[in-house]
């Protein structure tokens, strides 16, 4: 006998199987800007409940924001300008009695007063 070749019929379009999509196409990561916006919106509700302070030492100069609640702590590179209002996440009374204020926006710490200088910040609401 003659060998009979099996004839294959083309598969219908609904039966065609495609390889699975690459993982990056399935689980799209949230862009960092959107993550930050989501965190900002969730923390903004909490931030509005925090006390508001105003920096003004009366000398027209800025104050350097510190990394820790200590006058000798490293400066963060951020400043508060005279008249600038800010929200406080936490207060810490230092050993010398000075009240340090942690900014809600996480830039660091400032102080309510400084020995030999006087009042630096006042709570306004």
Image: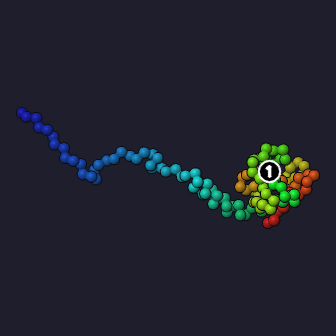
76 vs 58, left or right, is: left
Q: How many marks?
A: 1
What is the quadrant of the C terminus in the image? bottom right
Q: Indicate the position of residue 40 as horizontal and vertical percent values.
A: 64, 58
Residue lying at 77% horizontally and 53% vertically, measured from the top left: 79
Residue lying at 86% horizontally and 49% vertically, measured from the top left: 94
Residue that sits furthest to the left in the current view: 1
Residue that sits furthest to the right in the current view: 116
5 vs 54, left or right, is: left
Residue 51 seen by the camera: no
Residue that sits furthest to the front in the current view: 60
Residue lying at 75% horizontally and 47% vertically, measured from the top left: 76
Residue lying at 46% horizontally and 47% vertically, measured from the top left: 24
Above or below, comparing residue 85 to residue 18 in the picture: below
Residue that sits furthest to the bottom in the current view: 125
What is the quadrant of the N terminus in the image? top left
Label 1 SS: strand
Q: Indicate the position of residue 100 as horizontal and vertical percent values.
A: 82, 53
Residue 31 seen by the camera: yes
Above or below, comparing residue 63 to residue 52 in the picture: above
- Residue of label 1: 64
Q: What crowding class fits label 1: few (fewer than 14 Cα within 10 Å), some (14-19), or many (20 or more)?
A: some
Q: Indicate the position of residue 68 as horizontal and vertical percent values.
A: 79, 47
Q: Indicate the position of residue 85 as horizontal and vertical percent values.
A: 77, 61
Colour treatment of the image: rainbow
């Amino acid at each position: 006998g003659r060998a009979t070749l099996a004839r294959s019929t083309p598969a219908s379009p609904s039966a065609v199987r495609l390889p699975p999509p690459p993982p990056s196409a399935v689980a799209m990561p949230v862009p960092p800007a959107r993550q930050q916006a989501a965190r900002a919106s969730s923390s903004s509700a909490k931030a509005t409940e925090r006390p508001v302070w105003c920096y003004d030492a009366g000398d027209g100069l800025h104050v350097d924001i510190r990394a820790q609640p200590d006058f000798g702590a490293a400066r963060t590179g951020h400043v508060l300008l005279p008249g600038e209002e800010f929200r406080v996440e936490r207060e810490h009374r230092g050993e010398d009695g000075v009240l340090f204020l942690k900014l809600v926006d996480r830039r660091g710490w400032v102080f309510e007063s400084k020995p030999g200088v006087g009042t630096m910040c006042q709570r306004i609401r």
